[in-house]
Structures are given as structure tokens and as C-alpha cells.
Image: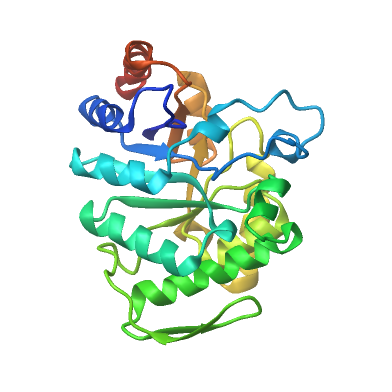
Amino acid sequence: MNIGIMIFPTDKSIQPIELAKEVEARGFESLWFPEHSHIPTSRATPWGGFKGMPDLPEEYWRAHDQFVALGACAAVTEKILLGTGITLVAQRDPIWLAKEVATLDYISKGRVLLGVGYGWCREEMANHKLNFKERRSILRENILLMKELWTKEEASFSGDHIQFDESWAWPKPVQKPHPPILMGSAGDSRAMAHTAEFCDGWMPIGGAHDIKGGLEKLSSACADVGRDPKTLSLGVFGAKAKPDALESLAELGVTRAVLPLPQIGRDKALKKLDEYGDLLSS
């Protein structure tokens, strides 16, 4: 199983450049950064959108821009894969996002993994002029448009939310036809339908999402569109750093486990990486 590391890089945590070097030196497969543009102080939406959740950790509003941070990481590494865990696609302009992803893939020589998700913070979306109820359909069209930009010399797109005239856009990604698109979501029927339609894998949150149930829905969704479920990879965000937990995930078909690194300073972060590193040889 491939093991990656995930953290909200902030002004209070170990910084991305040093972290990337240390992650690569220890032999981890990948490094993942989440994103939130900001968090409105009204805090009208509970953490994750679920009632009864504890207070939202401050790293959610202190996080660096994920693509700027990953670009810096690309410059000081050669092997580790660089993942977004996840990108809030519906909140972003897809034309700019397509260029950011393609540029990162180009300068990293094909090391990008694009984790995508719908998002949960209603007031954050409202500041982006995004209708919460339309976020899933907008994500779908944004990704379909980006695929056109990545794969066509002259790209265009026409959907319910986006009208895009025939245009040129470079660079193109190194990975063909484009970097893997990984759906970071719960395993509900609509998310699995989108995963089967336009993604290359599914990455739920360990312990928060029903992986077995999601896989059943994903298999059904693949059958609906005539796709072999085996063409989709399975990973888990927030996996438990225990051998037995990883073995249980492997039995489900998980091939990538991403371990969370807490908001801690340099010395403690490196110690935690050493602890996680023991799993690489177990």
C-alpha cells in the first residue's frame, strides 16, 4: 500500500518546503494539502455540515493556498506525488484552475494528484457567489471543461452553468490525458455517479465514511455507464496509522492511505513523520 502524508500548511505548522523534503527523504509516496479560501466568523455551518460537531480548528482559516504551496514543494523534490486533498472545485474559476493544475503538473514533471470535492461550508460558498444546492452540478461541469482544456488544442464547452467559446490554453499536463482526478467524498449515490462518470478514483475519509457501502454504490454507478470499477483507484484520507488498520483497508481494496499530520511545529512534526515511517517497512 502507498502511504502519503496530509496537513493543513499554516503559519503555525512546519512549512511546506521543509516538510516536502522530509516526506520525500523518508520514502512516503505523496504529500497532500487541503484548502479553504477563508472561514466566515459567523460559523453558521457546523464542521463538515454535521450537527453536534466540535469547534472548527483554526487551521481551516489559516491554511496557505494549496497550489502556491505545492508549487514550492515541486521545486525542492523529485519523486513524491503532490496531491490536493481536496480542491473545492465549485468555488473556483475552472479556466484558471485548469491552468494551475496543468502548470503544477508540468513543472513537477507529472506528479500531480487532483483530489476534488463538493465542499460543506455554506457561508464560505456564499462569499464566492456559489449556490450551495448547485455545487455538485457546477463541480461536474467545471471538471468536464478542464478536461477539454487539458486534452484539446482548441477547447470549448457548453453546459447549464458554463458557456466557453473555442479557445487556446497551455501548458498541457505532462500526465496523459490529464492528472488523476480523485473524488474526495462520502459514498452517496450522486457522488458515486460522478466518480464513475468523470473521475479516476475515490478517496473517502477513513472512519467518517462508509467505505463498503460506497463501493457497492460505486459498482452500481459504473454498471450504469458501462465502466469497469477496476479502472478506479481506491484511497483513504485520514487513515489510522496502525498496521492492523492499514491491513483492514487493504482487504477492502485500498491502495493508498493518507495519514494526517497535526498542526505542530517543526521538531514535533519530524518526530511524527519518523513514527509514521515505521509503517513503510512493516
Classify residue 105 by image quadrant. bottom left
**Horizontal relation, residue 222 to residue 123: left or right:** left
Q: Please provide percent x and percent y for residue 204.
A: 58, 42
**Horizontal relation, residue 81 to residue 93: left or right:** left
Work out whether residue 182 or residue 266 is closer to the camera in this orientation and state it: 266
For residue 109, say whether it is visible.
no
Q: Is residue 17 above or below residue 203?
A: above
Q: Please provide percent x and percent y for residue 133.
A: 76, 60
Q: Is residue 265 above or below residue 79?
A: above
Classify residue 100 by image quadrant. bottom left
Residue drawn at the location 38% of the way across and 48% of the way down = 67
Q: Quadrant of the N terminus?
A: top left
- The scheme the figure's colours follow is rainbow
Q: Quadrant of the C terminus?
A: top left
Q: Furthest residue to the right?
A: 51
How many numbered discs?
Answer: 0
For residue 167, say whether it is visible.
yes
Q: Please provide percent x and percent y for residue 24.
A: 24, 31
Q: Please provide percent x and percent y for residue 169.
A: 33, 76
Q: Is residue 17 above or below residue 168?
A: above
Q: Is residue 80 above or below residue 225?
A: above
Residue drawn at the location 52% of the way across and 36% of the way down = 237
Classify residue 54 by image quadrant. top right
Work out whether residue 217 or residue 163 is closer to the camera in this orientation and state it: 163
